[in-house]
Image (cartoon, rainbow, N blue to C red):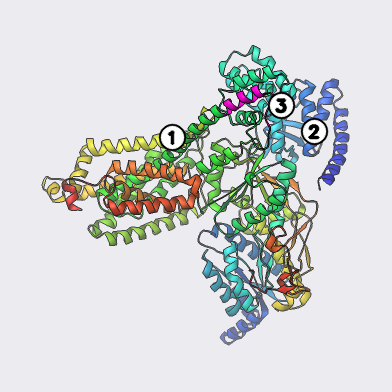
Amino acid sequence: MNYRKTRIAGWLLAAGMAFTGLAMSSTAQAQDTIKVGVLHSLSGTMAISETTLKDTILMMIDEQNKKGGLLGKKLEAVVVDPASNWPLFAEKAQELLEKDKVAVVFGCWTSVSRKSVLPVFEKDNGLLFYPVQYEGEESSKNVIYTGAAPNQQAIPAVEYLMNEVGVKRWVLEGTDYVYPRTTNKILEAYLLAKGVKPEDISINYTPFGYSDWQARVAAIKKFGSAGKKTAVVSTINGDANVPFYKELGNQKISAQDIPVVAFSVGEEELSGLDAKPLVGHLAAWNYFESINTPTNKAFIEKWHTFIKNPKRTTNDPMEAHFIGFNLWVKAVQKAGTTDTEKVIAALPGLETPNLTGGIAKVLPNHHITKPVYIGEVRADGMFDVVWKTTGTVPGEAWSRYLPSDKDIVADWVTLKCGNYNKATKACSGQNYK
Amino acid sequence: MKKSVRSAGARLLFLALLLAGLSIARLHAQSPSDASFLASLGQLREVSFPDKETIIAQLAQSGHPSAQSALTALLEDRLYFRNDDQMVFLLKAPAADDATSLTLVDPVTLKDAGSAPVENLTKIGTNNHLRRVLQTTLARFRLSSPDAAVRLGAVHDIEQNLDEGNVKLLRERVAAETDSKVKAEISTSLAMADLDSPDAPVRLAAIAVLHKSLRQDVLNKLSGVAGTSDGGEGDSDPQVRAAAQSAVKSITRWRTMYSWCETLFFGLSLGSVLVLIAIGLAITFGVMGVINMAHGELMMLGAYTTYLVQVAMPNHGEISILVAIPAAFLVAALMGILIERTVIRFLYGRPLETLLATFGVSLILQQLVRSIFTALNRSVNTPNWMSGTLQVNDALSVTYNRLYIVIFTLLVFAALFVVLKRTRVGLEIRAVSQNRAMARAMGIRSEWVDALTFGLGSGIAGVAGVALSQLTNVNPNLGQSYIIDSFMVVVFGGVGNLWGAMVGGMSMGVVNQLLEPYAGAVLAKIFVLIVLILFIQTRPRGLFPPTGRSSENQ
């Protein structure tokens, strides 16, 4: 891209070559770089969240190149824009893998976009690093899931509310699509297994961008006034969160009465609104910007310099990309090549430090180990960590709480299967049921 | 997991005590109670949340004159310690986002203690549970406040934790209390406590007091006594049980009635938003016959105007929204007139082309706003007088923002009605819409009237945008989510009829809210749409079909 051009120019200058040399140099150049695909929406509804991730990868590539690149070659970013359009994700992925022949792709945010590119990566044997918390129930040979699986976010959050806050009644409130529905299915199974009565669980879904929350919030208030401590587990996604929290504030439901723990509300989402009515509500993530470690401080500073804006926040999926990129670099160094087959084989067992302390390790099921933090919203839109797991939690692809999944394991090292049934000893391949 | 947190906490506690000891050594001039007070404050720095709770209780019981200020500061995130010497201070004012240095107050003398840079200060944190504990603790101090409203709040907070000490405190207070509201509140709380009394007559008397209450927690407690709650056997005394059962029945009946009132209000408030959007459309679509797909974007412009006005008047947050109403009207009206003059006037009588052209305009406006303001949500603050709830009684409360929007809709409706029926412009608008040729013959500049009419409809869309900025996200897609609903209202109510838009919008809002609890948000909407389609089949011209001469033109 841009620096490629300058490099070509510099090369030309140094060698003092004429026009004939240009063709030669650019072909030589193509062999000299390792291409890294970036598959994030830069326009459309998801652009708000995904543009940041594109910039994160560009920053990481920039930094790696300053360190001398990888295997003696420079890294070159190939950025495409799937425009928040799910079928376009598959097309762009195909373009990256078949036309640009990228060594690796960092990308996707929504589960539906990941599901859309999955067949492409499996057909072309590509490698995708997926950086967002998701609903689990998947493990592909060609994907490394650097975001949280449900047992690394949703289950610990519910455990916290149950054991530390003493919550007895649960409202599972979500936006109507695959991630909330699957997560709530797992949470419901978990709660029932822990002895919560079915009448103490209320599950409700609203459409994307829902804004008329008055009746829903009144219903939550009523549900929560039955004399048992009640909490809302929110998988509400995107814009709908703002009017939801506003309405909670208006109807005077404070975090002390009915705490709301959210899985999709982070620093980036809070930067667009007045956080005062939200103070004390909870979020569960594997990273918070406010966590004070030297690595995190250095990362935030680097981010501010790179993006040239000292007010930009950092968030959980950014850390996931930070981890994913470092893991990929290590895997390539270990394999001594960018060949996907060898890099994928090198990945399980690799370790890299997290930004907030602890080590991220790639597991045979292509998920990683992550620490879990519960934070309370502060008036400035940041989070105060009120609880954390002692060590890191290994990601589970298949939930042990769903009866249909309890025999299923994913293991790409010994079993070479993402969907292996321990009971029937069969691998149902990439069907994911 | 918890265990190791605790043990780490214990270690830190030890360290904190040590440091606290050091800081006390330096402050040898203070009295012993000051020293122990400071030591307790010092411990707050590093201990775990459960340990903080114990310390808070100690501080509250210490009777130290500065304890209340320190605990209030802790609740309000104003209790800090200095990193270099570990001394605890209160902040004079809450820390602003961009403050570089903070003014400190000595925790014992409550006098100014200079200031310190932000980097050198660390906040002593709380969590939800601690804040609740602090509120209940501090409520005891507030119970003797001269302000009745403060006392009422204090009673509410104390009720959260009706232990022996608090009940005793309330019993002492009820005798001295002069305000009837506070007195009633305390009586209810005491009656709740009396329900646990071993004497049956005391319990009976308590039920008699609680019979009139509408509160949910009272109902829960009484259900327990009555044996109607799940798994409970109820009171051992049959007389008490019977009294509780009758009280539960009465309270439930009243609460059900109020919950219907609440649903009705929800419906009216949703309806009034629809009406507000639809009356602008009733003018452009109804009176002029222009299908304006950019109507939603004009609302979005109104919402962004609200945002800009708010940014322009940073020190007048309470009134900026009032200024935004005329500003949004003007911005949207001027944009409307611009659209009419540049696009629509060439397309009169060709509805399909207008539809496509205005759809194009809507995309242009969206992208324009996206380019200027980015796609991120803009936060429009709600002024204090518009936030919170109006507590009608214990069973019914109404949020202020919705209430104001209902009132605002009625005002806009009335104003528009007056403009159309009582002013010269209104007369001309009606004349042109009824018979253009005749109106022109009478000397009315129909071109001007067209532009004005479109401007009026657009301006009202802008005003609706001001209202929407209080309810939903201000972003470039704001208009899209409402445009379909507003067309539905206009079609349902009858094209070109203001009363139709009013009745149509309100009834759609109420039906939607009645269905939503049973069917869910998505199904309720589908159901409303199906009913509307069936209705249009039988009455294609809506609730209030146009009559007389004007209907012949359409």
Q: Is residue A277 left or right of residue A148?
A: left
Element class at badge 2: loop
Q: Is residue B246 magenta?
A: yes
Q: Determine the CA span between mark 1 and mark 2.
A: 48 Å
The residue to which callout 1 is attached is B404
Residue in view at x 47 percent, y 52 percent: B523
Q: Is residue A168 left or right of residue B11?
A: left
Residue in view at x 28 percent, y 56 percent: B342
Q: Position of residue B266 (x, y in %)?
A: 46, 39
Q: Are marks 1 and 2 on the same chain?
A: yes
The residue to which callout 3 is attached is B137
Task: Verify CB contact (< 8 Å) between mark 1 and mark 2.
Answer: no
Residue range (magenta): B232-248
Mark 2 — on which chain does it sit? B
Residue A209 can be seen in this image: yes
Q: Position of residue B297 (x, y in %)?
A: 39, 52
Binning the other alpha carbons within 10 Å of mark 2 as few (below 14), some (14 to 19) or many (20 upward) gives: many
Residue in view at x 34 percent, y 44 percent: B504
Q: Say which of A14 and A215 sits in front.
A: A215
Nearest to N terminus: mark 3 or mark 2: 2
Element class at badge 1: helix
**Which numbered circle lies on residue B87?**
2
Mark 1 — on which chain does it sit? B
Going by the numbered disc 1, the residue's amino acid type is: Tyr
Using the rendered view, name the quadrant where residue B36 is placed: top right
Q: Determine the CA span between mark 3 and mark 2.
A: 24 Å
